[in-house]
Image: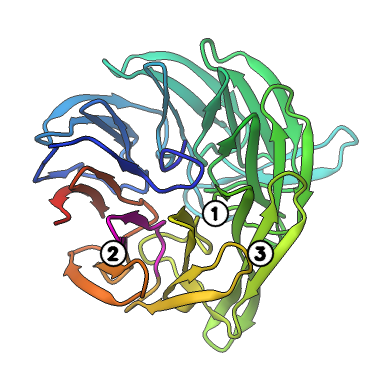
Amino acid sequence: MYQLQANHNAVVKRPHFAAYWKFDAGAKINSGLALVGDVLIFDTFGKQVIALDARNGSVLWRTNTDNIMMSSPAVSNGVIFVGSGDSGHPGSARQSFAYATDAQGNAENFWGRPEGDHVIALDAATGQKRWQYRTLGEDMPSMGVADGVVVFANGDGHAYGLRASSGDALWRTDLPGIATMASATMFSKTALVSVCDFAHKSAGATVALDVTTGSVIWRSPYGNCDSSPTYGRSRVFVSGVLGNRQPFGYGGRAVIAALDARTGKLLWKYSSSQSGPYTSVGTSERAIAGTFADGTYFQAVPTESALIAFDPVNGSIRWRFQAISPVKMSPVVYNGKVFFGDVAGALYEVDEKRGSLLRTRLYPSPFSCAPPIIVDRTLFLVDGSTVNAIRVD
């Protein structure tokens, strides 16, 4: 799934692995990174899925697709699952909104293209297409895979369950809104998806689904269609926004919530005291998935240009780190350090316990929502169109 596992702390133990290289994909990367053995996989705005040798950055294969790619590849049993999809606004040159009617003939709108988009299954070794499944809405959110079922929410207001081996539809469940970039999070036999009401993007919800049947287990009015839910210690952590108009234009206050994973009941909530602006620098995401690691919940808050460490039990703030500019990526925690970047191109290393700055490295492009992963002492990091392999020690 997105960032390897339900806590989103994408750290892979592989003793003695080391790499130091840079690769330019030639197109922007919003995709997260997937690692299969020594193969690093991601997708791009150039309508490609690319596999690199993680040891030296050389290209193993490239596969062309039908539209821009933003989803983080999910991998299971030698098969890669990605989704195509673009975002846009009514009347834009890309015509990213399409319209349809419900069973009663009432007009409905959704996030996608008139020609639809696809969930695509590729062979991890060769990049050859095994199957594809067309949806009416965009398929930017990353899939989760469990028990042979590929689960995702998308831009047409539904969650889907597909058979991983063939792409056959197993179930489709109506959702209370659309998912734009919120990846599915899987734990046990449960899939978590977050959505937004189409007319009011800041009005979010999170839904827990049975992986096998697609039936709704619970629904909570917290979360956001840009932000994947995070799971840790029987809690679900979600990030959302309350939007409003400010002197600087549209902005919002962050709303972070912890829910009981079994019932969806609210356990605690954090709300920003002031609104901050929505920006499209790096990426347009308004809310970002958090990371649970070592008994702490780490949450980027773009509207505050901050990363906050929460006590997962009661929601008290253990520390707050003020970045130069908005942070729009999930952090990774490794060896007592927290790694994350902002849209000014600053990569931070922060002390995990105290929140104090240990090191800053500057990069030429804004960091987007593509989060880093760590393999032993190597950090793989996306900056603009470039994938970087650097040492973290």
Q: Residues within 10 Å of mark 2 (few under 14, many from 20)?
A: many
| Tag 1 residue | 227
| On screen, residue 164 above or below 353 | above
**Spatial distance from mark 1 to mark 2, Cα to Cα?**
19 Å
Point 72% across, 55% down: residue: 197
**Spatial distance from mark 1 to mark 3, Cα to Cα?**
12 Å
N-term-proximal mark, 1 vs 2: 1
Point 50% across, 49% down: residue: 87
Helix, strand or loop under label 2: loop
* Front in this rendered view, residue 318 or 37: 318
N-term-proximal mark, 1 vs 3: 3
Magenta range: 327-340
Point 66% across, 47% down: residue: 178
Report the amino acid beneath label 2.
Pro
| On screen, residue 269 above or below 356 | above
Residue projecting furthest to the bottom:
247
Q: Are marks 1 and 3 in contact (CB under 8 Å)?
A: no
Query: Where does the image place residue 169, in percent across and percent down from the top left?
Result: 65, 17
Query: Where does the image place residue 376, in percent across and percent down from the top left?
Result: 21, 43
Residue 385 visible here: no
| Tag 2 residue | 366
Instruction: Look at discs 1 and 3 and give the one toward the viewer.
Output: 1
Instruction: Look at discs 1 and 2 and give the one toward the viewer.
Output: 1
Q: Is residue 338 magenta?
A: yes
Q: Quadrant of the C terminus?
A: bottom left
| Quadrant in the rendering for residue 358 | bottom left
Query: Where does the image place residue 320, in percent across and percent down from the top left?
Result: 43, 77
**Spatial distance from mark 2 to mark 3, Cα to Cα?**
24 Å
The mark found on residue 202 in the picture is: 3
